[in-house]
Image (spheres, rainbow, N blue to C red):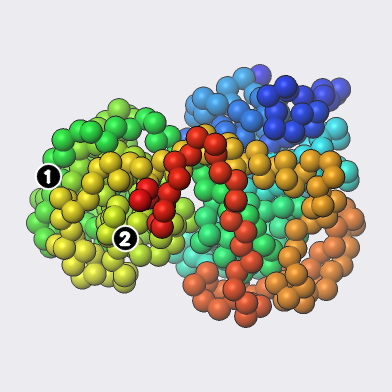
Amino acid sequence: MEMKQTISPVARKRTSTASPLPGRNVALAHHWIMSYRGGERVLEQFAAMFPESDIYTLVRDPGVDVPGIRGRRIHTSRLDRWYATRKRYQHLLPLHPWAIDRMRVAEQTELLISSDSALVKGLRIPQHAKHVCYCHSPPRYLWEMGETYKKRSLAARVALDWFADGLRDYDFRAAARVNHFVANSRFVADRILNYYGRPSDVIHPPVAVHEFSAGVDRADFDLVVSELTPYKRIDLAVHAYTRLRRPLVIIGDGGERKYLESIAGPSIRFLGRQPFENVRSHFERCRAFVFPGIEDFGITPVEAQAAGAAVIARGAGGALETVVADRTGVFFDTDDVESLCAAVKGFRRDDFSPQVCRQNAERFSTPRFLWEMTQFLQRKLEPGAAAAARIDRGSPAANGGMTGRRDPARSVPLPATRPTGTRPNGPHPTGLRPSVVRSTAVHPDATQTGAGGVQV
């Protein structure tokens, strides 16, 4: 049963014998539930860990099926009351803080776990509760890619031109109230430090590697699986493969599809959105998987490796953490067609073992994610844990020596000012290296790996 904008009159005690934190009353939050992609798969795993938890989200499309949260009590914001505001939630970005501030997490909640790449981390929680944020990324449209997002629509341009400063301040203040951050990659941990002045643990997201087979004969085509939006840089692949006259299959859809089709040569095939069985078949048969953009983590390169395919990727962002150079793929260094063309021409399928690709992908399995998250939560939040009674802020130096002020809504010190938003690959506002803590938990069934994560 779905409940909108309300909480139950009598909040029930949420406990489960399978819970990593027995006896804790846990709630979950996710930025919005409008598609079934990587972020929703993370939410599914949190729901599996806490099978009786309520879920809070800005808006939810009732036509989107997220199997792992079927039957859950889902609380949505006032923007979800009407079909028009739900469908245009992205155009209503300036109203997101207003809508989130008017949501109420049940008073009996002891722990909120948010899955966020937007502003839902701003949810107000009871005074006694803790908040763990699994951050897919600080909002890209606020901190570093505003100009790209402005090209999408007049509404986006108006929202970011007029309201970006206030939205950044809201996001920064919301981040200051989070007790513990978990980043989905070291690349994102760098951003969290740059923009929020906060350290974070790194736990890579779950990938369903068990759904793929690495033993299928390969065919003579390369593959892209992606949303067709500008920042994904699929245009680089289209230009490169058109110039090289090499076969490229593109699975996915989005606002840039018409433009990409207009610049594509006859060697490029657009299949649009496909059922999973067809996507899996293409992963398992492609000569190589092409990943031309800079992503926070990037699940599709891991899925490709799980299917035994090597990857041709831009040498930046999350791909540096998931692809092992010359073992499971190759990198191209610069954001231009010539660099990608050189990588494609230099790629030799026989140089890569499907078994080694598969083995590397298994580092990111779902059981590994559940194990690492359980270890993290127990370490941070179990009674007696030194960090349970404070916010993770690192050393004063790691926070730029910022002084705190009090948020009247909660007794948590807030930084007086937010750090200047610099690009993740640029200098840190503190002048220091990122304060990143990698998860040290090892799943008991995990294969021991050598350098690069591949068994030696």
On screen, residue 331 versus residue 390, left or right, reads left
**Amino acid type, label 1:** Asp
Looking at marks 2 and 1 on the same chain, the residue that comes earlier in the sequence is marked by 1
Percent position of residue 56, x then y: 69, 36
Q: Which of the numbered marks, if any, corresponds to residue 421?
A: none
On screen, residue 425 versus residue 374, left or right, reads left
For this rendering, which residue is in front, 153 or 110?
110
Identified at 52% across, 72% down, the residue is 423
Identified at 29% across, 38% down, the residue is 307
**Compared with residue 276, is residue 454 higher up or lower down, i.e. above or below?**
below
Give SS at disc 2. loop
Which residue was labeled with disc 1?
A: 220
**Amino acid type, label 2:** Ala
For this rendering, which residue is in front, 366 or 334?
366
Tell me the mark number nearer the camera, choosing from 2 and 1: 2
Give SS at disc 1. loop
Identified at 43% across, 34% down, the residue is 208
Q: Quadrant of the N terminus?
A: top right
Which residue was labeled with disc 2?
A: 325
**Compared with residue 34, is residue 291 higher up or lower down, i.e. above or below?**
below
